[in-house]
Image (cartoon, grey):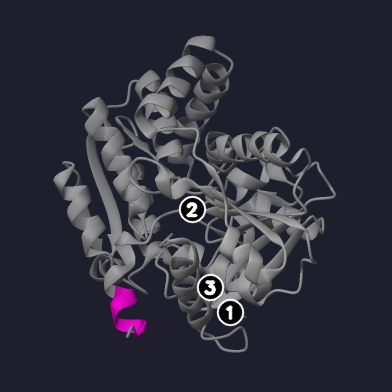
C-alpha cells in the first residue's frame, strides 16, 4: 500500500470534502497509536482477557479422513460474541477514545459486526447506533435483539436491496452530519483509506496465531488457507500472515447465490469490474450504465456488491485463488461439517466448507487451514427453513 492508501490501482479515498479532515485525523491517530507500547498492551490485554484469544487451531479429523487431505479449523467462532468481528471493533473503539469521540456508529449485514460494536460500546460506555438493512433485520432477529440488549440503537434501512450496501450508505450519511463527535467503525476491509489497512491490521491477529500454531503442530507451513469473502475482513485477517509465503495457496470463497451464470449472486471478484463504492476503488458489481447491481446471497454477511481493495489487488497480482459457492452448496457444507465435527458454522463460513467438500484444488496429504469466521447461532431460522432433518 502506498501513502495514499492505494493497493496498485485499488483503494484510495473517494469521499466528500467534509470527511477528509476526519479521515486524516483517524489515519494520524491510528499510525501513532499502533507504534505506542501502551496502546498495544491495552489492545492485546483486551484480546486475551475479554475476547478469549488465542483461538484454537482445531484438527478436523473426520472431515480430513473424508477429504483425503488434512484440514485445520481456525476457531474464530469461539471468540466472545461468536465471530472475528470483535477484534476490529475493540481496536477501533480504542482509537476513537484517543481521538476524543463520544459517539459510535456502524453498519452490519449478518449482525456480527453490529453485535461486536455494541459489545465494545457497552464495555467502554459509548453511545452506539447500528445501521442494518430491513431484509437483514428480518433474517437476523437474534442479533438484532442482542444489539438492543447491549444498549445499541438499531436503525432499519428500508431502501434499495434493504441489505448491507444500503446500511453502509446510511451510516456514511450519519457520519457526514455528525463527524465532529462521531467515529464510524467500518466492519470490513472496505471504505476509504485508512480503513482497509487498519481493519486488516486489527484482524491480522488471526493469521499471526494460525501461522504460529500450524508451525508448532506440524513443523511447516500449510499448503492452503481458505476463507469466505464478503467485504473480506476475516479473509485478510488470516491471509495477511501468509501473503509473502508464495507456496501457500490463498483461496477466497465468494457467495455465488443462485449461480454465477445468473444475476442472483454476490461475487464481485469472480464477475465484477473495477469501480468505486463507499469511498474506494475495488472490484464491484455494476451495470453498463454504471448502476450498482443488487447482490444476492443466502448469507447476510456476504450479500454485498463490492469487496476490499487489497483483495482486489491480490486477485490482479494472481496471488489470490478466487472460488465461489452457491447458496445450496453452503447449506450442504453447513450440515456436513456440523455432523462430522460438531461445529455449526455461520452461513458465511459454510460457503468455505461447501467449497472444500467439492474442491479439486488440493491433493492427498496437503495441509489446509480454514478460517471459521463465526458460529451459526444467528442463522438458525434460515437453516430450519432450508435444511431438512430426519
Q: Are marks 2 and 1 in contact (CB under 8 Å)?
A: no
Q: Camera-side residue: 335 or 291?
A: 335
Q: Are marks 1 and 3 in contact (CB under 8 Å)?
A: no
Q: Are marks 2 and 3 in contact (CB under 8 Å)?
A: no
The residue indicated by pointer 3 is 266
The residue indicated by pointer 1 is 287
Residue 64 visible here? yes
Mark with earlier residue (2, 1): 1
Q: Majority secondary structure of the magenta segment? A: helix
Q: Camera-side residue: 233 or 372?
A: 372
Spot the residue most to the bottom: 262
Q: Is residue 386 magenta?
A: yes
Residue at horizontal 40 percent and vertical 40 percent from the top: 86
The residue indicated by pointer 2 is 373
> Which quadrant holds the N terminus?
top right
Q: Which residues are magenta?
A: 382-388
Instruction: Judge whether 196 appears above or below 337 on screen.
Output: above
Q: Which is more foreground, mark 2 or mark 3?
A: 2
Q: Give residue 373's position: percent from left, percent from top.
A: 48, 53
Q: Camera-side residue: 58 or 301?
A: 58
Mark with earlier residue (2, 3): 3
Res 139 → quadrant: bottom left
At label 1, counting other C-alpha atoms closer than 10 Å, the crowd grade (few under 14, some 14-19, many 20 or more) is few
Amino acid at each position: 500500500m502506498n501513502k495514499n492508501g492505494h493497493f496498485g490501482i485499488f483503494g484510495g479515498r473517494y469521499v466528500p470534502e467534509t470527511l477528509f479532515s476526519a479521515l486524516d485525523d483517524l489515519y494520524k491517530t491510528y499510525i501513532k497509536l499502533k507504534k505506542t507500547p501502551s496502546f498495544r498492551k491495552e489492545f492485546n490485554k483486551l484480546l486475551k482477557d475479554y475476547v478469549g484469544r488465542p483461538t484454537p487451531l482445531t484438527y478436523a479429523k473426520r472431515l480430513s479422513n473424508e477429504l483425503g487431505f488434512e484440514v485445520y479449523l481456525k476457531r474464530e467462532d469461539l471468540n466472545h460474541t461468536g465471530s472475528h468481528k470483535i477484534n476490529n471493533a475493540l481496536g477501533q473503539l480504542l482509537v476513537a477514545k484517543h481521538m476524543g469521540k463520544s459517539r459510535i456508529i456502524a453498519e452490519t449485514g449478518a449482525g456480527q459486526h453490529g453485535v461486536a460494536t455494541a459489545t465494545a460500546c457497552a464495555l467502554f460506555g459509548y453511545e452506539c447506533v447500528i445501521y442494518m438493512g430491513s431484509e437483514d433485520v428480518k433474517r437476523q432477529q437474534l442479533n438484532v435483539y442482542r444489539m438492543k440488549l447491549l444498549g445499541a440503537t438499531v436503525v432499519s434501512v428500508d431502501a434499495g436491496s434493504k441489505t448491507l450496501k444500503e446500511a453502509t450508505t446510511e451510516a456514511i450519511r450519519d457520519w457526514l452530519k455528525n463527524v465532529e463527535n462521531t467515529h464510524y467503525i467500518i466492519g470490513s476491509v472496505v471504505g476509504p483509506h485508512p480503513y482497509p489497512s487498519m481493519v486488516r491490521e486489527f484482524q491480522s491477529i488471526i493469521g499471526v496465531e494460525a501461522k504460529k500454531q500450524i508451525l508448532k503442530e506440524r513443523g511447516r507451513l500449510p499448503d492452503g488457507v481458505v476463507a469466505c469473502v464478503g467485504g473480506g475482513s476475516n479473509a485478510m485477517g488470516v491471509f495477511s500472515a501468509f501473503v509473502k509465503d508464495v507456496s501457500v495457496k490463498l483461496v477466497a470463497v465468494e457467495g455465488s447465490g443462485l449461480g454465477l451464470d445468473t444475476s442472483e449472486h454476490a461475487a464481485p471478484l469472480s464477475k465484477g469490474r473495477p469501480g468505486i463504492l463507499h469511498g474506494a476503488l475495488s472490484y464491484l458489481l455494476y451495470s453498463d450504465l454504471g448502476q450498482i447491481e443488487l447482490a444476492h446471497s443466502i448469507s447476510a454477511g456476504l450479500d454485498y456488491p463490492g469487496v476490499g481493495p487489497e483483495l482486489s489487488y491480490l486477485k490482479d497480482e494472481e496471488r489470490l485463488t478466487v472460488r465461489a459457492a452457491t447458496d445450496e452448496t453452503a447449506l450442504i457444507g453447513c450440515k456436513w461439517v456440523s455432523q462430522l465435527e460438531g461445529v455449526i458454522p455461520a452461513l458465511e463460513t459454510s460457503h468455505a466448507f461447501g467449497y472444500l467438500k467439492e474442491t479439486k484444488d488440493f491433493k492427498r496429504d496437503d495441509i489446509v487451514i480454514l478460517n471459521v469466521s463465526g458460529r451459526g447461532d444467528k442463522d438458525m431460522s434460515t437453516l430450519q427453513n432450508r435444511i431438512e432433518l430426519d
